[in-house]
Image (cartoon, grey):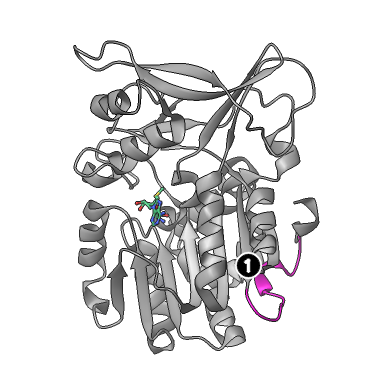
Amino acid sequence: MARVIENAGAWIPFDRFMALALYAPALGYYTQSANPIGKDAKSSDFVTAPEISKFFSKTLARSVLEALDETQTDEVWEFGAGNGTMAQEILTCLGDRIKRYVIVDLSMSLKERQQASLAGFLGQVTWVHELPAQFEGVVLGNEVLDAMPIKLLQRTQGEWFERGISSLSPDKEPHWQFVDRPTSMRPPLIPQGEHDYLTEIHPQAEAFINTLADRLKRGAVFLIDYGFPEHEYYHPERCQGTLMCHRSHLADTNPLVEVGLKDITAHVNFSGIALTAQSAGMHVLGYTSQAHFLINSGLLDLVQDASLQDKAMVQKLITEHEMGELFKVIALGVGDPWEPMGFAHGDRSHTL
Ligand SMILES: C[S@@+](CC[C@H](N)C(=O)[O-])C[C@H]1O[C@@H](n2cnc3c(N)ncnc32)[C@H](O)[C@@H]1O
């Protein structure tokens, strides 16, 4: 990191720092961490919906099946498959209806975990490092957009700056500091007021959507993550941004310490995702909360005969103060638009 910063002229933008901290070969969090995702705070750093309850993936499988049928495709492409738990459940539910389940992940250590958990499906599952020029199928990504590097923008006394990183003492133990440089970049919605304001923009997540739009020739995309529409994202009161780090199931806001040892994330601007998709020729098929999406997709039927313990975990997925409201689902489509069941009630596309 210190060498990269020095070679770049003693300053790198935050998105470069975040990319290195998370994905640098051997040293980045996702490349070296043995077990980032799980329920146990002693052995993992954070938990995700597929790890909380298998009913998350079982329910999503219903919407995946509908999308495969609607788009007449037979492949699932999952980005950032974590421990492989969601893939395992979806393959169990949909069996031979999925001809090929393709995983795209930047993390080699997670790929090893995925290979172990998907050992029973090796005939159907393949891993690729890059998207081919053309592909068809249903694309899935749970908590992947939030792991894509973001740029930090800071308004100080009415002037906008890009926040980057410099080394504090390049010759000794590396220490990092934030350094702001004047910029012509602005958030897509300028927050009202003159007060100092720190926020993020998401060029890499939007580039990812452009790549999908370019290469997905038939199919649909379901992206699930925490975030909001732009008017909430750039709300005048959200003046400290949404950047968060996670280690041992504790959250903090300082990405400059324990670099490579903790996860760094930011919320998703779903308006930016929707507008990018539309400009690139995709349709927004729906946008709603995780709770609405799961209930519309049949979660309550599936869980009817479950144990009390399973039902308690399902509650976490849908209650407002846990994951139900902060997490959203957006579906994008190529070709003729159709109406996925997941958005039948409570579609909020109009708020984007
Ligand atoms: C927060 S984890 C979520 C893992 C899993 N989906 C889950 O819900 O448990 C983020 C994952 O996204 C992967 N990732 C981040 N950016 C990616 C990209 N551009 N392409 C593919 N995978 C990516 C990371 O390597 C990691 O596996």
Q: 185 left or right of 1?
A: right
Residue under label 1, please give it: 332
Identify the residue at horizontal 22%, vertical 38% (top origin): 27
Identify residue type, mark 1: Leu
Magenta stretch holds residue 337: yes
Q: In the rendered view, tell whether residue 209 sits above or below residue 190.
A: below
Where is residue 157 shown, x and y percent of the image?
A: 69, 11
- Residue range in magenta is 334-346
Q: Is residue 26 above or below residue 59?
A: above
Residue 252 in percent (x, y) is at 44, 25
User: Regarding mark 1 in the picture, which secondary structure is present there?
Assistant: strand
Q: Main secondary structure of the magenta part?
A: loop
Q: Is mark 1 within 8 Å of ligand 1?
A: no
Q: Residue at x 76, y 60 (%)?
A: 346
Q: Nearer the viewer, residue 51 or 239?
A: 239
Report whether 172 appears left or right of 232.
left
Q: How many marks?
A: 1
Question: Where residue 329 sits in the image (x, y, percent)?
Answer: 61, 58
